[in-house]
Amino acid sequence: MSVSTGYQTFIGLEIHIQLLTETKAFCSCHVEFGDEPNTHVCPVCLGYPGVLPALNERALFMAYQVAEALNCEISPITVFDRKNYFYPDMPKNYQISQFGSPIGLNGFIEFPYEGEIRKIRIHDVHLEEDAGKMIHAGDISLVDYNRAGTPLLEIVTEPDLTSGDETEAFIHYFRRFVRFLKVCNGNMEEGSLRCDANISINTIGSGLGTKVEMKNLNSSRFVRLALNHENARQQKVLEEGSTVHQETRLWNENRDITVVMRRKEESHDYRYFPEPDLPPFRPDEKYMSSVRESLTELPLFRQLRIAAEYKLSNDQAAFITEELERADFFEQCVREGADPVEVFRWLSGDVLRHLNREHILLHESTLTPRRLAGLLRLISEGTIHGKIAKKILQVIFEENMDPEKILSEKGMEQITNEDEIRALVRRVIDEDPAAAAQAADGEMKVYGYFMGLIMKMSSGRADPQITRRILETEIMQEK
Amino acid sequence: MFLDEDGLWKYSLDSQEKVEEYTSFVRDMDRGIGAFLEFDPRRQASGIVKKEGSLSGLPIAVKDNIAVEGFRLTCGSKILSDFSAPYTATAVERLMREGALVVGKTNMDEFGMGSSTDNSALQRTHNPWDLNRVAGGSSGGSAAAVAAGMVPCALGSDTGGSIRQPASFCGVYGLKPTYGSISRFGLVAYASSLEGIGVLSSSLPLMRTMFETMKGTDPHDQTSGTVDSPTDTVRKIGVLKNPEGLAPGVQRGYLTAVKELRGLGYEVVEIELPVLEYVIPAYYTIASAEASANLARYAGIRYGYQNAMAEDPRELTEKSRDEGFGQEVKMRILLGTFVLRSGFQEQYYIRAQKIRTALRNELDRMFTQVDLMMMPTFPVQAFEHDSGEMDQFQQKIADKFTATANLAGIPALAFPVGIEGGLPMGMQFMAPMHAEDRLFMAAESYSRVFTPRLSSYAAGRTTS
């Protein structure tokens, strides 16, 4: 959707990602989703009297990875703060977060959008803890604290996005970004990646307008719909000569509109102050270099490199770098000698179909780069042709075997011996002379019928080109 | 009864009979004192008591804001009056590992807020030296239990003087260690950056063993840790030039102590500490700010006192807090909320932190000139219950000598210096961070001048 009415749109995001740690941010409870309520809790994450938080080093490390990957200035000293507000799903009634000295400041992220590379500035990256979940059931309220204390990383962008569509694309890319870094599974439906947005519009050249915050954006689609709706609403307000109020609005997914949640004057005073229970952390050069060493090539750059290095189209490279495991798999196949385009074709075709059908991921399947490369080698060497290759792929998936072994054990080698093939051809012609006569009269589709029979008899092993040639010769002789 | 001629505890609870005998003695004794909120030496299963260990069979009392599994953890508050500790504090666990036996939980000012233990919502505790008087606070129950000879030592917590002031009121030793040297895990938080667990005892060697046993890094408390300091000597002691506002008796005691220190061979120099006048506003600003967050968890939802009539979560929290907290606690929560408002932090909270930094710098400078400092613990001796002798505001002002050590994080030890008007009186030593050694050495040497004795009440009952 494009708006070209003399207005400029500014969209910023507050993204929360749940870090993929085994244990919670400040205690040793396991991070698990979907288990029985209140089974992953302890005195610490329940905020019992007398307990203290002990910071999860893994969560801290991941936070630095993200800050570094987002090109942030790393604070020489990182401090935790208490953010005070009462809510039943918050055990301590304050959240351990970061306010004054977050982990990273003033970064940026680049992502591909409509054939360009867009750059979005990052305001800050800070580490905090998640709350539990409150469920209202009729006139009772239930609280599940399994999620309480899960490490959350908040990434705040500057208002550099310009439309709902672009924001949706950004979130897709950001999901890839965190999955490449292996810090979050990026699942918006489960809430492991959440996002609030702020949007303001103004006449071009007049700077930011009045900011409206948007909440309840539970999928990237809702983000797009809500922001585009809000963009149009604010424009209408301005065109009518009124003013946009600074407020928080909720996306109502049933009615496809945004509605007011609270006005500015109702906003909280969180009374931040430094968390006395956690000492400030000063990352030294050694720590930061281990952070940098741990970082992987980011999806955008890997996409660009793969396109250039293997002479693939941008879309092909985008497919390959959609998931880290897929990109690794691809490059491993190529290193094993496979042709990049062929690897792409198989990964985006038969392999993907199988994975989708079985609801598994590439790296969870029995197909390894070596096996796919081996399969492609058998094709390129002429040992097998495409149809057999598909069968072998199926066997790899089902029986966890190497393609070469399947070939020898299951007798799937291509038949290229002309005498053998001629015998097959003669058999089908002799069994159906009427059809052979039709073919000889020029009924081309009967050739297909004979080819099918031969392939069936040879379990698909007869070399199609040789078979076709011999079949044509033999039919001609029938004339 | 359980002490030898030198006042040392000689009774090990190593048999069923001894536990029974001890239990009935304490129950009888405490009827007039009210030191214990809970007393039951059999609670800590006898199997757990180790026969070996430096503290084997030693009964200890624990202030009721320190978690001991199997006991309640009331903090002297209605809001936690039925709350049982689901775990044990690290400090207590370390004592148990050495064979100590937790016999009960002691009374205190609600959440440690007070100087008399009269702010307890659950019980009154009387000073064993004069039952009409307070035992001090907030660790008043622990101080009274030790002074009455019911236990040789007790754990307390010190946020602004809560170990040292009751120790001086009751004529026993009170140690507030270096901030972080003993894990706070299991100590119910009031003012996290100021407080710590410490020991009240009638015996310095025992106090030292207790401290050595409890101290050290705890993975559950990332602010914990100790630094080994080289063996020390104490030669030079700084004393305040003109400590203001002391009651005449305390003033006399102070001057006597100065004289005695000289007599013991120390070089005593007079020092001035102008920043002392800012200690109380800074202390109460920081303590209240932290308290307002620390006490937010008592919301009537997961544990603790619950209003039964509430219609929704918000009302449940509001009513439970309104009915569960006492006046002083509410006042400090409100004060803390006030000083942390955005836009006002510069004026209050941040300014208090600046005073804190200035005080630390001042003390650092001071400790390049002297090995120890000596100050009064409190401007008055134990006052009467409900006397109006000291209102809540005056009690706060009077914390300036003790709160100094909490703001700076340095260790301090209150020691008895004499009996004045039938009541004990104490002073305190302060040392640089991690130099507890110096405190013990100086207190040990002062004990040659004045040996603390059992309170009159306890003495009357134990001469058998």
Image (tube, coloured by chain):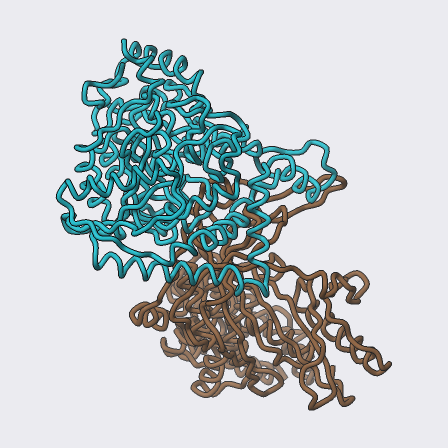
Chain colours: A brown, B cyan
Nearest the eye: A33 or A288: A288
Tell me: B329 left or right of A181: right
Q: If the image is split into quadrants, where does the N terminus of chain A sit?
A: bottom right
Note whether A346 is above or below B355 in the view shown.
Answer: below
Which residue is drawn at the image coordinates 33% and 30% (left, top)?
B420
Note whether B232 is above or below A407 in the view shown.
Answer: above
Q: Position of residue A197 (x, y in %)?
A: 65, 70
Tell me: B184 left or right of A226: left
Which residue is drawn at the image coordinates 22% and 34% (left, top)?
B209
Q: Position of residue B40 (x, y in %)?
A: 40, 19
All told, the count of numbered labels is: 0
Q: Position of residue A361 (x, y in %)?
A: 51, 62
Note whether B370 is above or below B153 in the view shown.
Answer: below
Note whether B96 is above or below A21 in the view shown.
Answer: above
Q: If the image is split into quadrants, where does the C terminus of chain A sit?
A: bottom right
Q: Which quadrant of the view contains residue B156?
A: top left
Q: Which quadrant of the view contains residue A156?
A: bottom right
Q: Which quadrant of the view contains residue A172?
A: bottom right
Tell me: B133 left or right of A34: left
Residue B71, visible in the rendered structure: yes
Which residue is drawn at the image coordinates 52% and 81% (left, top)?
A110
Residue A37, visible in the rendered structure: no
